[in-house]
């Protein structure tokens, strides 16, 4: 049985996809639960610590609330906090996020390195979105938080991009979806294309590890294979889920 952290209310904690900023629970409760999840990652040797700057995260969240155009999102407040915190702890010099839609998932990762939530400086932060119109919207959203351009959005195929990327990837975020029945199965193709680029100890985050578990079966088997990854933990903070794996 793979390791898992499961919130007691994961199946009743729900958000309205078109109300991305609506508070679902008191902030103290959200902070406490995400801290427990981070501590579970530490216990499995996936993260070195569970501490991140709460004030910087609050500034990041407010900036997204104030500036981003988000038609809808499945990234719950708990997951937004967890993704930001993982990046703030790992501090990846190169981060690649595949399938960023309007940029909300991308900035949940990159917001630890750019804008008012920044706690370190990265070298390359890349968001990939294959739909050109959504890539343009994501780029516009990100520019409002990061006018420097250090975080960038590309209208590109994630498998092709990963295959030709020319630097070690220290954090890879997967939220892409292919047309037709393949859907989230594309995660495995992206992972395999990027695998040789993953730095030792690199973190891979895969959204939808719960609600798309069947389609992600081959992907989950790969990241839970000790011959390929040191460890992997399924964070079940909500009905979507986030698989967190260490290369």
Image (tube, rainbow, N blue to C red):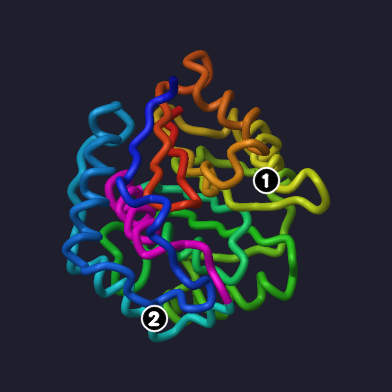
Q: Residue at x 20, y 39 (%)?
A: 49
Task: Give the CA distance from mark 1 to mark 2.
Answer: 28 Å
Q: Residues within 10 Å of mark 1 (few under 14, many from 20)?
A: many
Q: Secondary structure at mark 2?
A: helix
Image quadrant where residue 6 sits? top left
Q: Main secondary structure of the magenta part?
A: helix
Task: Name the residue tied to disc 2.
Answer: 65
Q: Secondary structure at mark 1?
A: loop
**Residue situated furthest bottom in the rendering:** 66
Is 90 one of the magenta-colored residues? yes
Marks 1 and 2 in Cβ contact (< 8 Å): no
Q: Residue at x 61, y 44 (%)?
A: 212
Left or right, residue 107 beside residue 132: left
**Residue situated furthest right in the rendering:** 180
Image position of 232 with respect to 203: above or below? above
Left or right, residue 83 beside residue 135: left
Q: Is residue 164 visible?
A: no
Among numbered discs 1 and 2, the one appearing first in the sequence? 2
């Amino acid at each position: 049985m793979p390791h898992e952290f499961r919130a007691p209310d994961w199946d009743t904690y729900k958000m309205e996809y078109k109300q991305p900023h609506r508070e679902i629970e008191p902030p103290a409760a959200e902070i406490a639960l995400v801290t427990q999840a981070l501590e579970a990652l530490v216990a499995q040797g996936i993260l070195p610590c569970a501490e991140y700057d709460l004030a910087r995260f609050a500034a990041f969240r407010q900036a997204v609330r104030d500036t981003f155009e988000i038609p809808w999102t499945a990234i719950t407040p708990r997951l937004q906090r967890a993704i930001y915190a993982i990046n703030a702890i790992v501090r990846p010099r190169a981060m690649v996020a595949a399938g960023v839609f309007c940029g909300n998932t991308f900035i949940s990762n990159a917001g630890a390195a750019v804008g008012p939530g920044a706690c370190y400086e990265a070298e390359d932060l890349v968001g990939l979105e294959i739909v050109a119109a959504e890539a343009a919207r994501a780029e516009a959203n990100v520019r409002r938080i990061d006018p420097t351009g250090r975080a960038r959005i590309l209208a590109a195929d994630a498998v092709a991009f990963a295959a030709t990327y020319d630097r070690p990837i220290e954090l890879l975020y997967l939220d892409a979806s292919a047309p037709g029945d393949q859907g989230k199965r594309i995660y495995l193709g992206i992972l395999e294309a990027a695998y040789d680029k993953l730095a030792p100890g690199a973190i891979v985050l895969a959204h939808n590890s719960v609600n798309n578990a069947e389609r992600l079966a081959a992907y989950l088997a790969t990241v839970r294979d000790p011959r390929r990854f040191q460890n992997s933990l399924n964070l079940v903070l909500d009905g979507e889920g986030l698989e967190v794996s260490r290369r």
